[in-house]
Amino acid sequence: MSLTHLDDKGAARMVDVSEKASTVRVAVAEATVKMLPQTLNMIIEGKHAKGDVLAVARIAGIQAAKKTSELIPLCHPLMLSSVKVELEAEGTEHIKITATCKLTGQTGVEMEALTAASVAALTIYDMCKAVDKGMMIEQIRLLQKTGGKSGDWQV
């Protein structure tokens, strides 16, 4: 198996997808933010001085998915048809972020889903760092992808 972002001399390149068929492609990624129980309670109860942490993180994740090609050098700019970012409390110390990206196109949306989940997590950290500097961003990973020549994949 060879790396697609390297040419035959080992130089970085953007993959040519012009000959690929357009198919419906979906990717789902997740991230988890671990925090103190009192920080999670503050977020859930809407008592954060900066406002609705989950709403801001959701918007940040959506915006990040749309800008992935500006952040990751060899990613193609994509016309996403859908980006969903869901955030939910898990237990007393975690917020689980699930990002789903979809399009009909010639290349996958895994990087967009991973970027959305990551930036949503970073936004939670940014908004809450004044009250909980020990927060940890964990488990950033792809959960599944569908569509394209390589087919479907799931954790």
Image (cartoon, rainbow, N blue to C red):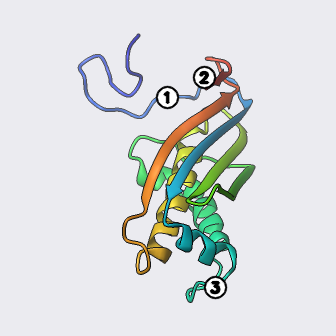
Q: Which amino acid lies under the numbered mark 3 shown in the image of this protein?
A: Lys
Determine which quarter of the picture holds residue 88: bottom right
Marks 2 and 1 in Cβ contact (< 8 Å): yes
Q: Residues within 10 Å of mark 1 (few under 14, many from 20)?
A: few
Above/below status of 125 relative to 101: below
Nearest the camera: 69 or 146? 146
Above/below status of 40 relative to 96: below
Give the mark nearest the N terminus, 3 or 2.
2
Circle 2 — which element? loop
Specify whether 87 is left or right of 24. Answer: left
Q: Which residue is mark 2?
A: 19
- In front: label 3 or label 2: 3
Which residue corresponds to the image point at 54% horizontal and 45% vertical from the top-left? 114
Specify whether 39 is left or right of 3. Answer: right
Q: Which residue is mark 1?
A: 16
The circle on residue 82 is none
Measure how far apart labels 3 and 2 are at the Cα level. Answer: 52 Å
- Residue 111 location in percent, x, y? 53, 42
Nearest the camera: 113 or 120? 120
Q: Which residue is mark 3?
A: 47
